[in-house]
Image: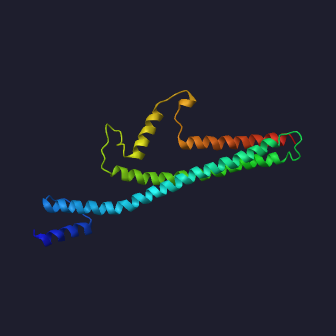
Amino acid sequence: MDGCDGWHFILTTIREGHKIRRSDGFHSGIVAKVLMSKNDSVDEPLRKQAWDYFHMHSGQRLTTFNFYIVISSVITTGLVATFQKDYQLPRLGIALGLLLSFFSFIFWKVDSRNRQLIKGAEEALIFFEKASGFEDTNGVPHVAKIFLREGYGTSQRRAGKSTLPWKKHYSYTTSLNLVFLAFALIGLLGGIIAACRR
C-alpha cells in the first residue's frame, strides 16, 4: 500500500464510519488516531452543551426555591397576624392559608420539572464520563468521574440504615419536598383555624 492508497484508506474509513477490524501496522494506527480525534471534536460541543444545560437548570432550581421561601415566609407572617384578637379582617387568614398551600403545590410542580431537566443533563454527562477511559478501582468510580462517583457514594450512604432521623441520608429532592409539605400544611392548618375563629 503506497502513500496515496494509505490516505485513501483513512478517508474512506472515516467517511463510512466503519470500525477498524484490521491490523496493518502503521496505517491502522494512523486511522485510529484520526478517528479518535474526529470523535473528540464531535463530543466536545455535546459535552459542553450538557454541562451548560445542567448548570442552567440546577441554578434555576435553587433560585426558584429561594424565591418560594421568601414568598412563603411573607404569607406565613401575614397569616399569623390574622390570629390577633383585634384584627379587623379575620377572613383574610382563610385566603392566606389557601394561598400558601396553593403556592406550595405550584412550586413543588415547578421543582419537579426542573429536576427532570437536570436528570437529563446528568445522564448525558454520565455517558461522557463512562467513555472517558478512566479506570475504576474495585468498583469505585474514578475520582474524575464526578457524577458516577457521587451516585456511588449516595447509594452507599443510603445502604447505611439508621433509626435516628438526623443520621439518615436525605437527598436534595427529599429535603425540598419536606419544606414544600411543611408550608402546605401550615397554610391548610392556618386556613382552618382562621375559618373556625370567624
Please give the name of the residue rendered at 73% of the width and 47% of the height, measured from the top-left corner.
74
- Image-based side of 96 in relation to 173, left or right: right
- Image-based side of 51 in relation to 14, left or right: right
Instruction: Name the residue nearer the viewer: 74 or 107.
Output: 74
Q: Position of residue 118 (x, y in %)?
A: 50, 52
User: In the image as oriented, which residue stretches furthest toward the top?
Assistant: 163
Please give the name of the residue rendered at 10% of the width and 70% of the height, measured from the top-left corner.
2
Q: Is any atom of residue 19 visible in this view?
A: no
Q: Position of residue 129 (x, y in %)?
A: 36, 50
User: In the image as oriented, which residue stretches furthest toward the bottom?
Assistant: 4
User: In the image as oriented, which residue stretches furthest toward the left?
Assistant: 1
Number of marks in the image?
0
Q: Position of residue 119 (x, y in %)?
A: 48, 51
Residue 11 picture quarter:
bottom left
State the colouring used for the structure image.
rainbow
Q: Is residue 189 above or below residue 115?
A: above
Q: Is any atom of residue 38 visible in this view?
A: yes
Please give the name of the residue rendered at 17% of the width and 61% of the height, measured from the top-left corner.
28
Q: Is residue 178 above or below residue 65?
A: above
Instruction: Name the residue nearer the viewer: 90 or 44.
Output: 44
Image quarter where the C terminus lies is top right
Image quarter where the N terminus lies is bottom left
Q: Position of residue 33 (x, y in %)?
A: 23, 60
